[in-house]
Image (cartoon, coloured by chain):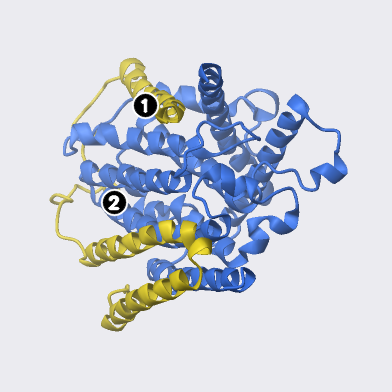
Chain colours: A yellow, B blue
């Protein structure tokens, strides 16, 4: 059963080897002449002001939350979709109800203006 | 059984190698296509018609200095490009390139591809965060918000295909499409195809949705603070995404390795000839999508960020839900309740 995962594992090992290998190699053979200006943050030639780790728009947080909600919904659809043709009308009505409920929430989100980016 | 496993392991190495070459030449191809569209020549100095250009580029970037800014979080800064490129490569694991030729046929193949693509977002996010630079942070915030938004529509579009196939295994999705073009999912799922295709532009961070690295406002976006091979790995990941997205589109919507009307046009084809023909068909279909991606990139201007998010959330998401309901309803009528 788990034998079929072995090639996937090999692919992961190859990809990791490529990633780590090229990072190591470039560190080994590249020149190293650091100086203070070179190592400062790039801000189009200006002196960097403060740190970048400041507060940023709450919109991104909202999008992340909405993503989790809808992604879980879609995840529920996968097993439903596989079994759908065996379950027939029953599954169809169930899913219409499910989508309907989530759509109500979606409508609320839109009306609240969460998805307005200005 | 052991022999079969060995075959798959060898195939894995072969596929990894060819994927590597394809990605390297996708960069060359992109530059040539761009040059043609802008009436330029493009790279033509290294090797015959500039064919050795990708290797010259890799060598150059390998020999460059690694600049790690003092304010950066060193470990995460190093980790981020590796995550990006690794996740881009291992997405390919589920894609069959000919009948019986795949790295693995796992019963949750489609789910695996979606999951691995999601992890790819971490590379971009961590890169921006660990650089501790304003351009990088803004770019990575945009990138992660955009990628997760379009992932929803992508996942929804696939539900339609799963409804028809009754399986999440990628191999059965390809097999269900047969050699008859009318059974290809692009015909059976036109709306789903359109949603998936648009979403894959956003997933691959390409124009018209390349806001995470829009040069005019963010310099380089999330990879502003990266140099040498670290930058090259992001670049590599981007083009791997391009190849992988084209392969997924081919597999899920364009019949994968299926040769159109094969039993009618080439009835005598079997054995290794059939396998080679199927691999060739797969590559041709994939290249078609790669070219379309490039064509769009050099033709359309960039979206505004609010338009991008609006398109994802207000149009593609409801359309995706509609597609699921329509497909389910149609199947219900087709199967006679």
Residue B276 vs A66, above or below: the answer is: above
Percent coordinates x, y for residue B68 in the rendering? 24, 32
Residue at numbered disc 1: A16
Mark 2 vs mark 1, foreground winner is 1
**Is residue B290 in sight in this rendering?**
no
**Quarter assignment of residue B269:** top right
**Quarter assignment of residue B27:** top right
Q: What element carries label 1?
A: helix
Image quadrant containing the C terminus of chain B? bottom right
Residue visible at 61% across and 58% down? B299
Most foreground residue, B239 or B18: B18
Looking at the image, residue B295 sits to the left or right of residue A69; the answer is right
Percent coordinates x, y for residue B114 in the rendering? 42, 49
Percent coordinates x, y for residue B97 in the rendering? 62, 36
C-beta proximity under 8 Å, tags 2 and 1: no
**Is residue A25 in sight in this rendering?**
yes
The circle on residue B73 is none
Most foreground residue, B319 or A81: A81
Q: What element carries label 2?
A: helix
Instruction: Estimate how packed mark 1 is, as few (under 14), some (14 to 19) or many (20 or more) residues with alpha carbons within 10 Å.
Output: some
Looking at the image, residue B270 sits to the left or right of residue A12; the answer is right
- Chain bearing tag 1 is A
The circle on residue B135 is 2
Residue visible at 37% across and 57% down? A75
């Amino acid at each position: 059963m788990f034998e079929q995962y072995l090639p996937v594992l090999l692919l992961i090992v190859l990809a990791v080897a490529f990633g780590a290998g090229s990072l190591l190699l470039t560190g080994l053979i590249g020149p190293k002449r650091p100086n203070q200006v070179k190592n400062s943050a790039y801000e189009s030639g200006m002196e960097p002001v403060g740190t970048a780790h400041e507060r940023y728009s709450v919109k991104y947080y909202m999008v992340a939350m909405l993503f989790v909600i809808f992604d879980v919904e879609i995840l529920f659809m996968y097993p439903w979709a596989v079994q759908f043709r065996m379950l027939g009308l029953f599954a169809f009505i169930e899913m219409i109800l499910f989508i309907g409920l989530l759509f109500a929430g979606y409508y609320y989100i839109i009306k609240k203006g969460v998805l307005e980016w200005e | 059984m052991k022999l079969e496993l060995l075959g798959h392991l060898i195939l894995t190495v072969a596929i990894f190698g060819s994927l590597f070459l394809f990605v390297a030449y996708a960069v060359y191809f992109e530059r040539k296509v761009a040059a043609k569209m802008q009436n330029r020549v493009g790279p033509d100095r290294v090797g015959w018609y500039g064919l050795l250009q990708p290797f010259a580029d890799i060598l150059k970037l390998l020999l460059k200095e690694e600049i790690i800014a003092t304010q950066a979080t060193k470990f995460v800064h190093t980790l981020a490009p590796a995550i990006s490129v690794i996740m881009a490569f291992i997405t390919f694991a589920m894609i069959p390139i000919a009948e019986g030729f795949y790295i693995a046929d796992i019963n949750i193949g489609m789910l695996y591809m979606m999951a691995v693509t999601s992890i790819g977002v971490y590379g971009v996010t961590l890169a921006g965060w660990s650089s501790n630079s304003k351009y990088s942070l803004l770019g990575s915030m945009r990138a992660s918000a955009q990628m997760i938004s379009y992932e929803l529509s992508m996942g929804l579009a696939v539900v339609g295909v799963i409804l028809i196939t009754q399986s999440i295994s990628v191999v059965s999705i390809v097999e269900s499409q047969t050699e008859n073009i009318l059974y290809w999912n692009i015909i059976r799922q036109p709306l789903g195809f359109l949603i998936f295709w648009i979403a894959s532009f956003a997933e691959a961070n390409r124009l018209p949705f390349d806001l995470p690295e829009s040069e005019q406002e963010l310099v380089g976006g999330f990879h502003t603070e990266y140099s040498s091979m670290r930058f090259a790995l992001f670049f590599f990941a981007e083009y791997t995404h391009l190849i992988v997205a084209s392969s997924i589109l081919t597999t899920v919507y364009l019949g994968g390795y299926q040769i159109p009307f094969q039993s009618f046009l080439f009835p005598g084809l079997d054995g290794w000839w059939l396998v080679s023909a199927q691999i060739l068909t797969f590559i041709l279909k994939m290249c078609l999508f790669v070219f379309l991606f490039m064509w769009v990139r050099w033709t359309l201007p960039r979206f505004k960020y609010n338009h991008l998010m609006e398109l994802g959330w207000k149009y593609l998401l409801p359309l995706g839900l509609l597609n699921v309901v329509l497909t389910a309803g149609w199947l219900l009528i087709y199967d006679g309740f």
